[in-house]
């Protein structure tokens, strides 16, 4: 993965240098892939991303312009700043993608149209719609979760996207979502959800209160490595509704961690750049608890659905303990595990392009003059907010 300022790229110019599964410096050219190419655009939150995939899902270019520095002073994403940044960054990233692979081979445009901070997906959707309309290209609007579900299938070594055996369980954990899904018979069903905060949101809120900066997940993950994960114990939530027995709830944990912190010292921490041992112990215990709870439904879900594979994706899928322990769980039971490549855990456009390819293969395209953009996730069964099934089969 190459890094320039706030921008990251994995693609023709940088493949092989980062992310799990990356080949040794292999370079992929558009000519080696089946045409047409797919252009992916992602602007649902605070990353502006543009990607180009070959016809089999080969990742040719994956550009991400991070806005972390712009939002960090506010300890969270400011919607207006995010939308303006997308407007400024998109033309630049598109020009760079064109320079790297040549966009004349693009035959499909895919864009995230929800859920997200409404101004942000509006910018990307308008941009993609105009691009597709001007070039008479088919356009596919993709749900952000549908895109995260597609990311474990992608490879960063220039190879086509992997086929995923079914049935498969998919854990998607991000700043806005924490859910298990079931891939079966070519479709996807939502199996559980969080009743309150998402796991990534809790990492971010705890970090903000402690003065550890934004985003909190990576910082807490790093600090937890030097702490004792058994130092603090937190009781799991009790969900009374029997239909939600496998649901997550993380807001009580956030409160408990912050109370424990407040009882040990003043918040925010006096030395957030080098926290004392008790903070590292608390963060290690917090991380272990989040992972315990995220993996808790697995046993029962596996017994019910008998998956041959389990996938992990979303920003929190970068968490080192979560990756390690899910891998161990699957190895012990002889179940295939497919972790999203590290470079594709956070928001990116490669996963958007792939989800768009899968939809287009079913003949599902959108009218660029009437693409519906929505702020909230609202799946009924396995459908997105527009009532279309999530992640349809090839
Ligand atoms: O998927 P994503 O990039 O954006 C959303 O769709 O929300 O996820 C961002 C979330 C943030 O909450 C961030 O703190 C969290 O992913 N995150 C992590 C790690 N890296 C990113 N959480 C825990 N451990 C990490 N290493
Ligand atoms: Zn996301």
Image (spheres, rainbow, N blue to C red):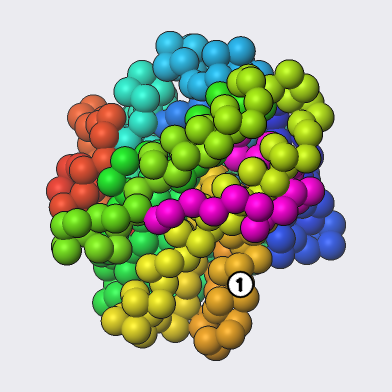
| Extreme residue in the front direction | 263
- Up/down of 292 relative to 345, above or below: below
Q: Would you say the beta carbon of the disc 1 residue lies within 8 angstroms of ligand 1?
A: no
The quadrant in which residue 124 appears is top left
Direction from residue 255 to residue 195 in the image, left or right: left
Please say if 77 is above or below 202. above
- Image quarter in which the C terminus is found: bottom left
Q: Residue furthest right?
A: 25
The answer to whether any part of residue 153 appears in the image is: yes
Residue at 84% from the left image edge and 62% from the top image edge: 24
Residue 30 rendering spot, x and y as whole percentages: 65, 52
Residue, far bottom: 334
- Helix, strand or loop under label 1: helix
Image coords of residue 128 (percent x, y): 40, 30
Q: Quadrant of the N terminus?
A: top right
* Membership of 269 in magenta stretch: no
Please tell me which residue lies in front, 183 or 290. 290
Magenta range: 215-236
Q: Residue 303: x percent and y percent?
A: 34, 84
Residue 304 location (% of width, % of height): 29, 81
Residue 358 appears in the figure: no
Which residue was labeled with disc 1?
327
């Amino acid at each position: 993965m190459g890094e320039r300022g706030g921008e990251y790229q994995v693609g023709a110019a940088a493949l092989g240098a980062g992310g799990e599964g990356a080949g040794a410096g292999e370079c992929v050219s558009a000519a080696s892939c089946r045409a047409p190419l797919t252009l992916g655009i992602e602007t649902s939150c605070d990353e502006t991303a543009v990607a180009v995939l070959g016809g089999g899902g080969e990742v040719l270019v994956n550009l991400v312009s991070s806005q972390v520095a712009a939002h960090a002073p506010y300890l969270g994403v400011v919607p207006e700043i995010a939308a303006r940044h997308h407007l400024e960054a998109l033309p630049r990233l598109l020009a760079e993608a064109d320079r790297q692979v040549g966009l004349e081979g693009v035959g499909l445009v895919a864009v995230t149209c929800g859920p997200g901070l409404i101004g942000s997906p509006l910018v990307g959707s308008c941009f993609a719609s105009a691009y597709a309309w001007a070039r008479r290209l088919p356009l596919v609007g993709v749900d952000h979760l549908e895109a995260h579900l597609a990311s474990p299938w992608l490879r960063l070594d220039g190879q086509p996207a992997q086929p995923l055996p079914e049935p498969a369980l998919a854990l998607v954990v991000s700043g806005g979502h924490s859910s298990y899904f079931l891939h079966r018979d070519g479709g996807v069903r939502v199996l559980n959800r969080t009743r309150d905060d998402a796991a990534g949101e809790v990492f971010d809120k705890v970090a903000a209160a402690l003065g550890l900066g934004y985003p909190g997940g990576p910082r807490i993950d790093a600090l937890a490595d030097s702490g004792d994960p058994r130092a603090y114990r937190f009781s799991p939530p009790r969900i009374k509704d029997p239909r939600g027995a496998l649901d997550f709830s993380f807001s009580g944990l956030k409160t408990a961690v912050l109370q424990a912190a407040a009882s040990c010292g003043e918040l925010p921490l006096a030395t957030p750049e080098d926290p004392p041992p008790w903070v590292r112990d608390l963060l290690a215990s917090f991380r272990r608890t989040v992972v315990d709870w995220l993996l808790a439904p697995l046993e029962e879900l596996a017994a019910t659905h008998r998956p041959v594979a389990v996938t992990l994706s979303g920003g929190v899928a970068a968490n080192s303990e979560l990756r390690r322990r899910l891998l161990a769980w699957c190895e012990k039971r002889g179940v295939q595990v497919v972790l999203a490549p590290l470079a594709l855990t956070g928001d990116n456009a490669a996963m958007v392009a792939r989800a768009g390819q899968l939809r287009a293969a079913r003949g599902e395209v959108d009218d660029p003059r009437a693409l519906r953009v929505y702020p909230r996730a609202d799946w009924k069964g396995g459908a997105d907010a527009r009532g279309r099934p999530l992640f349809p089969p090839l």
